[in-house]
Amino acid sequence: MPIFNYKGKTKGGGIIKGEIEALDIDVARSILLRQQLIILWIKKKSKEIVIPGFGAKVTEKDAVVFTRQLATMIDAGVPLVQCLTILANQSDNKLLAKTVNSIKTSVETGDTFSDALRKHPKIFDTLYTNMVEAGEIGGILDTILNRLAAYMEKSMALKKKIKSAMVYPIVILIVAVVVVAGLMIFVIPTFAKMFADTGGALPVPTLIVMKISGIFKNYTHYMVIIIATIIFLLRRYYKTEQGKLMIDTLTLKLPIAGLIVKVAVAKFTRTLGTLISSGVPIIEGLDITARTAGQKVVEKAIISTISSIKEGQTIATPLGKHKVFPPMVIQMIEIGEATGALDTMLNKIADFYDEEVDTAVEALTSLLEPALMVFLGVVIGGIVIAMYLPIFKMASAIG
């Protein structure tokens, strides 16, 4: 639907500027009049040219701030439509402001808040909209929004820990590749020409390095194309159900599988605990948790658990059949079910595994740093030594 910019005066004399989404200008006017605004001017917004990949986007941080502010205003007794108007007008993010205006228009035309949010799945996911729906039904929307904000903040913190742990090794590896490629393409050929002019047999390590240098110099563009093609095909394959399951299964066999499991368990327990404590039914909560798991092995385990629960089993029993969930987690879930405090127990497990992720990330970082230094030393040092061996040989022969 088209968007209209407007400027209006409230009953109290205040001036409001904003955007509204409507079928046409007459519908936009009627919506603003229902809000008891005196319209000073209204006009259709001109279309913006958006270059793919460079347009505005709503970050997790933007969504958290929006959720916190909305919860505070609703708790203070401000009507929902007025809350959305204020948040749209004060937002620095153009896309978020446009989205909030669209949500406000949907609410004004009769949609529930959760249904209005569902029209924007790229910003508000299934977890978000279902929790909002539970809050609307239970009359505790402000409480639910605060829980959502807390959940999102903890999820962001977990992602930040993983990303910060990966930055250092990735940077070191990129530097190593650039340095080695530079040596192979520009430096080694100079040595090779010098050795060819002098004649004589060269040591085996020198010959090997020169051969690799020749490959780099003559076939670099082919290597880049092959690597790019492999990455592209792997990404395409990962988007398929079978590919995602296979790759996610393989990642659980890597040396860092322990960290991957801890992250998966922390996310699973945090999501399910937040949903149950917000009043979402257990089956629906598990279904949402499976769709937002991010790990296909975990998703498959949860879907299998849903089928077992429908047949009358508890959560702990079918989950225990899947090795991805540690025995301690299963036992704590079992205790939570027995005591009727499953949501509390799930949140405790999530807190514990958040700390475990912290410890695992620190251990991984402290292990990777010396390992990468040794790797760089061996590779670059080996190249240098291989190229100087003929020089040492010639020097000893002259001596």
Image (cartoon, rainbow, N blue to C red):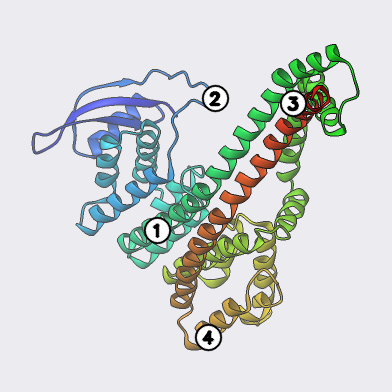
Find residue 43 and report its horizontal and vertical position in percent: 30, 20
Using the image, determine if residue 138 lies above or below residue 161: below
Q: CA distance from mark 2 to mark 1?
A: 30 Å
Tag 4 or tag 3, which sits nearer the N-term? Answer: 3
Q: CA distance from mark 1 to mark 3?
A: 44 Å
Between disc 1 and disc 3, the foreground one is 3
Give the residue number, with chain letter if any, for mark 2: 52
Find residue 53 and report its horizontal and vertical position in percent: 53, 27
* Quarter occupied by residue 217: top right
User: Are there few (<14), some (14-19), or many (20+) residues within 10 Å of tag 3?
Assistant: few
- Quarter holding the N terminus is top left
Tag 3 or tag 2, which sits nearer the N-term? Answer: 2
Between disc 3 and disc 4, the foreground one is 3
Give the residue number, with chain letter if any, for mark 4: 335
Q: Residue at x 59, y 58 (%)?
A: 293
Give the residue number, with chain letter if any, for mark 1: 148
Tag 3 or tag 1, which sits nearer the N-term? Answer: 1
Q: Residue furthest front?
A: 399
User: Are there few (<14), some (14-19), or many (20+) residues within 10 Å of tag 1?
Assistant: many
> Label 2 amino acid?
Pro
Using the image, determine if residue 177 lies above or below residue 348: above
> Label 1 amino acid?
Leu
> Label 3 amino acid?
Val
